[in-house]
Image (cartoon, grey):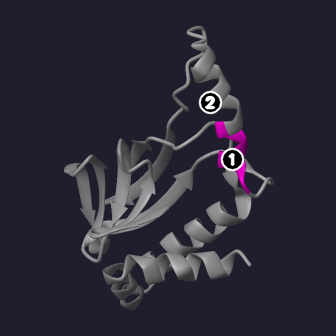
Amino acid sequence: MQATADGVVLGNRWKTHLLLSRDGISRRLGVGALEAFAWEEIEGITLHVPTSRFRFPGVAARAISVPVRLLNLEMWDLEPPSGAVDVTAGGEQYRLDIDRHHFGGYWHLQIIATQQMLDRLLADPGMRELLDDPGRMLDSVARMTR
């Protein structure tokens, strides 16, 4: 997750990602919305990304990918596989692919806390006010992992 001026980003904000804002969620490529859903129409949202028990999986992924890139081993595809978010809205289910930052899993406690945050945003409209201050929202999720 990352804080931006527009809200909280799930996924790689330089590629396809999900933006959470007070108005709803949108899957974006850069700053352009590909799909958008208002909170009021969303019935469910589930994050699907691989997890790891290692607290800093991105560090390990970079430790491997940097030498591979330097050696220019073309046989390796260095793009991590996509993650996904399932959104249920209007009785329909939508699978929204999002680009990930690195290979391997994300720290499992961070993913649990992120899913709990999504569940709270759906259940309590008052919680969406936190999305006006994305840094505060991320701090709240970080506290949930301690």
* Residue extending furthest toward the right: 53
- State the extent of the magenta-drawn residues as a range: 56-62
Closest to the observer, 82 or 120: 82
Identify the residue at image location x=42%, y=87%.
Answer: 127
**Residue 132: x %, y % from top left:** 31, 82
Would residue 104 be found to the left or right of residue 75 on screen? right
Gap between marks 1 and 2, in whole Å? 11 Å
* Residue extending furthest toward the bottom: 126
Tag 2 residue: 66
- Quarter holding the C terminus is bottom right
* Residue extending furthest toward the left: 32
**Residue 77: x %, y % from top left:** 55, 18
* Amino acid type shown at disc 2: Val
What secondary structure is found at the residue carrying circle 1?
helix
Identify the residue at image location x=44%, y=78%.
Answer: 135
Is residue 92 visible in the rendered image? The answer is no
* Amino acid type shown at disc 1: Val
Identify the residue at image location x=43%, y=76%.
Answer: 122
Q: Quadrant of residue 38?
A: bottom left
Kindly identify which numbered label has been placed on residue 59: 1
Vertical comparison of 65 with 145: above or below = above
Marks 2 and 1: in contact by CB < 8 Å? no
What secondary structure is found at the residue carrying circle 2?
helix
Q: Quadrant of residue 61?
A: top right
Identify the residue at image location x=34%, y=60%.
Answer: 19
**Residue 81: x %, y % from top left:** 54, 32
